Image (cartoon, rainbow, N blue to C red):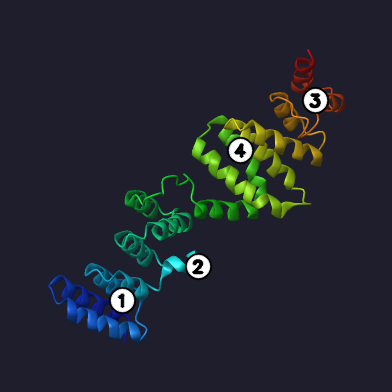
């Protein structure tokens, strides 16, 4: 079979289905799928079975994707499976599959839009940033962690909440891989500053103290803690840290001023 034959066969079978020759199309599709036909053939057969209400048979033809590893999902088969599950009243399975689909493929705007438009019952809190998008950025940042400070600086100049959320998730994902490496301070400082930008002071404080355990004289982190309330369950008081950094860098006016304000 040459490359064009499967496409031509699919077009012919779709035409048969549209013109009412459903039984003939189903029989030929069953035979083709038994011979190992392409995913498109299984999807078309499943659609025809679902159209006449045989939902269990449709899901069987699709390979029960709601029960398999989400990384193996075919986009078209997944869309059809979600629709079949909803029609069959199997909302819980539809919701789980739709959530998997969104997280794995939601970096494609068409997929994200489709999942939202389907309005699957119970799937009301989809995050703005799908896992697939975070994973892609994390992979890029892991290869070039030195760019992280410049990305954070850009957000400090012109903050955008969704971009900050994406950066936080991606940097947090790669941080464990940099334990014991010099780059770890870039990442901890980035996470502290990004958290502070969106008002997450607890996370900002936690990452700032972690960074200062790596670099006790980091002026940027000391200044950040100077803008936060103390929590001695997380780390030493800001005044103590600012004093330490101020003594080390007497020519840093920002640190000197922050220390004086903290102890005033």
Q: Which residue is mark 4?
A: 152
Q: Nearer the viewer, mark 2 or mark 4?
A: 2
Task: Tell me if label 2 and label 1 are in contact, CB under 8 Å.
Answer: no
| Residue 113: percent from left, percent from top | 36, 50
- Is residue 206 positioned above or below 172 on the image? above
Q: Which residue is mark 3?
A: 242
Question: Residue 9: which disc?
Answer: none
> In what element is the residue under mark 4?
helix
Q: Quadrant of the N terminus?
A: bottom left
The answer to whether residue 183 is left or right of residue 240 is left
Q: Residue furthest front?
A: 89
Q: Which residue is mark 1?
A: 41
| Residue 109: percent from left, percent from top | 39, 51
Q: Quadrant of the C terminus?
A: top right
Q: Nearer the viewer, mark 3 or mark 1?
A: 1
Determine the image quadrant of residue 5: bottom left
- Is residue 138 positioned above or below 206 on the image? below
Label 4 vs 3, first from the N-terminus: 4
Residue at mark 3 to residue at mark 2: CA–CA distance: 51 Å
Task: Tell me if label 2 and label 4 are in contact, CB under 8 Å.
Answer: no
Residue at mark 2 to residue at mark 4: CA–CA distance: 35 Å
């Amino acid at each position: 079979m040459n490359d064009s034959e499967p496409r031509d066969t699919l077009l012919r079978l779709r035409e048969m289905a549209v013109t009412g020759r459903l039984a003939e199309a189903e029989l030929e599709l069953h035979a083709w799928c038994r011979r190992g036909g392409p995913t498109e053939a299984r999807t078309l057969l499943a659609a025809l079975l679902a159209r006449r209400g045989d939902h269990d048979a449709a899901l069987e033809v699709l390979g029960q994707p709601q029960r398999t590893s989400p990384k193996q999902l075919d986009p078209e088969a997944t869309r059809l499976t979600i629709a079949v599950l909803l029609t069959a009243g199997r909302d819980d399975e539809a919701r789980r599959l739709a959530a998997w689909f969104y997280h794995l493929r939601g970096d494609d705007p068409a997929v994200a839009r489709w999942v939202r438009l389907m309005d699957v019952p119970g799937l009301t809190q989809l995050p703005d940033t799908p896992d697939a998008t975070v994973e892609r950025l994390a992979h890029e940042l892991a290869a070039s962690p030195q760019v992280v400070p410049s990305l954070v600086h850009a957000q400090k100049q012109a903050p955008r909440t969704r971009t900050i959320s994406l950066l936080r998730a991606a940097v947090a994902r790669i941080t464990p891989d940099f334990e014991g490496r010099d780059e770890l301070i870039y990442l901890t400082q980035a996470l502290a500053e990004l958290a502070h930008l969106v008002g997450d002071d607890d996370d900002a404080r936690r990452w700032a103290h972690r960074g200062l355990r790596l670099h006790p004289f980091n002026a940027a982190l000391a200044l950040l803690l100077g803008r936060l309330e103390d929590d001695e369950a997380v780390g030493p008081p800001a005044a103590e840290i600012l004093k330490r950094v101020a003594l080390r860098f007497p020519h840093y006016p920002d640190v000197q001023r922050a220390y004086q304000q903290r102890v005033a």
